[in-house]
Image (spheres, grey):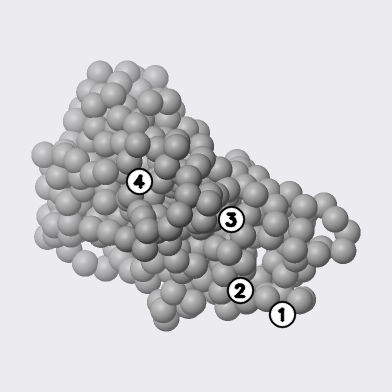
Amino acid sequence: MSAPTDWLIDVADEDPETLLRTLDARGWGDGLPVVAPTPPRVEAMLDAGATGDPDEPLAVLQPRRGIVTRRAVAVNAVLAGCPPAVFPVVLTAVRALCQPEVNLRGVNATTHPVAPLVIVHGEIVDTAGFNGGAGAFGPGNRANATVGRAVRLVLLHLAGARPGSGDAATQGQPSKYSYCVAENLAESPWAGYANRRGVDAPSAVTVHCGENPHNVHDMEAAGDPRLILGKLASAMSSLALNNAPISQGEWFVALGPEHARSLASRGLEPGDIASFLYDHARIPAGTFRRHFGELAWAEWMKLVDDDHALPMTEHPDNIRVVVVGGPGKHSALIPSWGMTRSVTMAVEG
């Protein structure tokens, strides 16, 4: 099938500044320099990572109901500077965002600074060069940086999530530029996250719409699980988080390998960690009622007395544990926006 040409525009010359001015005049881009998505580059991206008709409609992205095709995603992947090897991850992440439980319309319409976090699992972490080790949430890795950026460009260009119009976030957050890490399965003492979520595939992607990572440190030499988990519970027990009045909210706990090993050495599994946090990250019901005029609670939570200590989410399964990072006694808590659910999918083109 010949490639359609209705997306092509003429640029006067190859000067990067000319391209930036051209994009800016049309309200495109994220404000950073981009790679020109020439037809040969887009075709190379598709050849490396797309297995179906490049112009087949796959889904729609809210709020503009932009049509997702492999070619449209490839254009944005080129713009972001993606190497072709990571394109299946970008495409899978976009497919995940289209799932109804993500509630992308709400994610984009809220004033909360929510951004989709892409977590990459399995073989493609190594084959495409993703970073799940030291500094995984930070700069310096092309796969992480460009995949996160490509997903954001898709949201800008296809979903229409432009700040102030399609994206209502009051202040935004840095992760709205790029938000992608890999699971550090090599240093995890447990089975991989995707496998624990029932996705049996060589490679997988999780999309979780949440806040920037909240650092949690416990430097005690002994690595006492009660201290590590106590600090995580303390970070969760905050009225300031958007999740606080929303009982269906999810919480991703990105454990650093050292914390993970300390917990596993005492026989704890991810489900045990979730149960501990569910039991210890609590605030009296009366405090919730005093601070919030509206509480999106499970029915059973509405029946308790004011002095009853309520958990920060209605079920332990809403607390998801994954190992990310390198040396050091640090972990991160990533609360969701609230009315959204994470999605884990097998990588496919």
Query: Residue 295: which numbered mark, if any?
Result: 4
Which residue is label 2 attached to? Answer: 272
Which of discs 4 and 2 lies nearer the camera? The answer is: 4
Q: Earlier in the sequence, mark 1 or mark 2?
A: 1
- Dot 3 or dot 1: first in sequence order is 1
Q: Residue at x 85, y 55 (%)?
A: 220
The amino acid at mark 4 is Leu
Which quadrant holds the C terminus? bottom left
The percent coordinates of residue 48 (x first, y second) are 36, 62
Which label number is shown at residue 267?
1
Which element carries disc 1, helix, strand or loop? loop
Structural distance between the alpha carbons of marks 3 and 4: 18 Å
Q: Amino acid at mark 2?
A: Asp
Q: What is the secondary structure assignment of the residue under circle 4?
A: loop
Rendered residue at 35%/36% (across/down): 293
Mark 1 → mark 4, Cα distance in angstroms: 36 Å
* Residue depicted at x 65% and y 45%: 215
Three-letter code for the amino acid on which mark 1 is drawn: Gly
Callout 1 touching callout 2 (CB < 8 Å): yes
Left or right of 316, for residue 186: right
Residue 211 lies left or right of residue 110; in this view the side is right
Nearest to the observer: residue 326 or residue 68: 326
Are the residues tagged 3 and 4 within 8 Å (C-beta)?
Answer: no
Please report whichever mark, 3 or 4, sits nearer to the chain's N-terminal start.
Answer: 3
Dot 1 or dot 4: first in sequence order is: 1
Mark 4 or 2, nearer chain start: 2
The picture quadrant where one finds residue 29 is top left
Q: Residue at x 13, y 57 (%)?
A: 57
| Camera-nearest label, 1 or 4 | 4
Reading the image, the residue beneath label 3 is 281
Res. 307 visible in picture? yes
Nearer the camera: disc 3 or disc 1:
3
